[in-house]
Each structure stands twice: as structure tokens, then as C-alpha cells.
Image (spheres, rainbow, N blue to C red):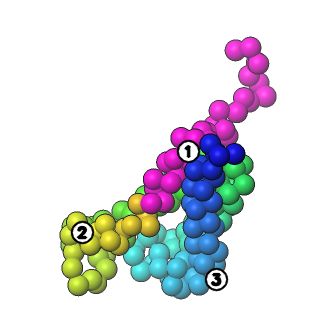
Amino acid sequence: MRRNLPMILIRVLVGLVFLVEGILKFLHPVELGSGLFAGIGLPFPQYLGPAVGGIEIFGGAAILVNLYAGDAALLLLLVILTALVTTKLPILIGGPIGPFPVEKLPHYGLLMFFHEARVDLCMIVGSVVVLMNSGLHFVRRRQWWQSRNG
């Protein structure tokens, strides 16, 4: 148990953050779901908001209970990397990136990027750790036509 404690703590933290964020996308769609996605220029925000919320809820829960945790971590890694590029990278360069506007802040650049992206960066590292520890199970599953020997 003592050897597994650090991994359990990482899974609890990553799973809870994604689970809560997914729930909030449904409870407050204008501020955190489809409304936010429309404001930052993502396509089809009315579908993308609930889809991302669902991925975060099920992925966070999967990591919490360690059921297909690696597969869930990979999906959540894609979600958080997209969030980083669309909302935080403009802060780093101090201007919009394509259709993604820059948030109005008193300062821009590297330090402000790290300040604004601190949770995103922690979730990226946590998701990578869960993925490395748990591996991918769904992808490696044998199909019914594959033999057990080959």
C-alpha cells in the first residue's frame, strides 16, 4: 500500500479535477461549456461543450476507480492539450493564434503563461504519469479473430 500511495494520490487528484470540471461544463454551460467554446472560436461549440464535459466526467471517474485509467488519461491529455493551445498559448505570445483570441490580462509573456497555465500543466503531467503507470488496455485488446498464440 505504501509503495502505491503516490500513484493513488496522483490518480485521485487528476481524476477529481477532471470529474469536477466536466460536471461544471453541464452546470454552467455559458461560462464553462459551449458558451466558453464559442467565445474562443472552437467549431460546433453546442456539441463540443457537452462532448468534452462527458469525456472529462467519464475519464475522471475512470482514473479515480483505476478502470481503463491509461486510456482515459490519453483522452484527457488530448482535451487538456487543446485547452492549453487555445486559451494559454495566446498569453505566451501576447496575441491571438488563428481564431483563438488572447485573454485580456495586465501582462503577457512566459511568466504570465506559467501563472495562467499552472493547473493545465499539472493535469498534463498527472495524465502522463497515469498513462505511463496504467498503460493502454483498450487499444491492446485482442479481437475475437486473433489467436491467443499469435
Label disc, if present, on residue 27 of the rendered structure:
3
Locate the C terminus and report the quarter of the image it occupies: top right
Residue at 64 percent of width and 83 percent of height: 27
N-terminal-most mark, 1 or 2: 2
Q: CA distance from mark 1 to mark 2?
A: 28 Å
- Residue 60 highlighted magenta (yes or no): no
Q: Which residues are magenta?
A: 122-150
N-terminal-most mark, 3 or 1: 3
Cβ atoms under marks 3 and 1 closer than 8 Å: no
Residue at 76 percent of width and 24 percent of height: 145
Residue located beneath label 1 in the image: 131
x, y percent for residue 117: 37, 67
Q: CA distance from mark 3 to mark 2?
A: 32 Å
- Viewer-side residue, 18 vs 87: 18
At mark 2, the secondary structure is helix
Q: Is residue 102 above or below residue 75?
A: below
Type of the residue with mark 3: Leu
Residue at 48 percent of width and 60 percent of height: 123
Residue at 60 percent of width and 78 percent of height: 24
Closer mark to the observer between disc 3 and disc 2: 2
x, y percent for residue 25: 59, 76
At mark 3, the secondary structure is helix
- Residue 127 highlighted magenta (yes or no): yes
x, y percent for residue 72: 62, 52
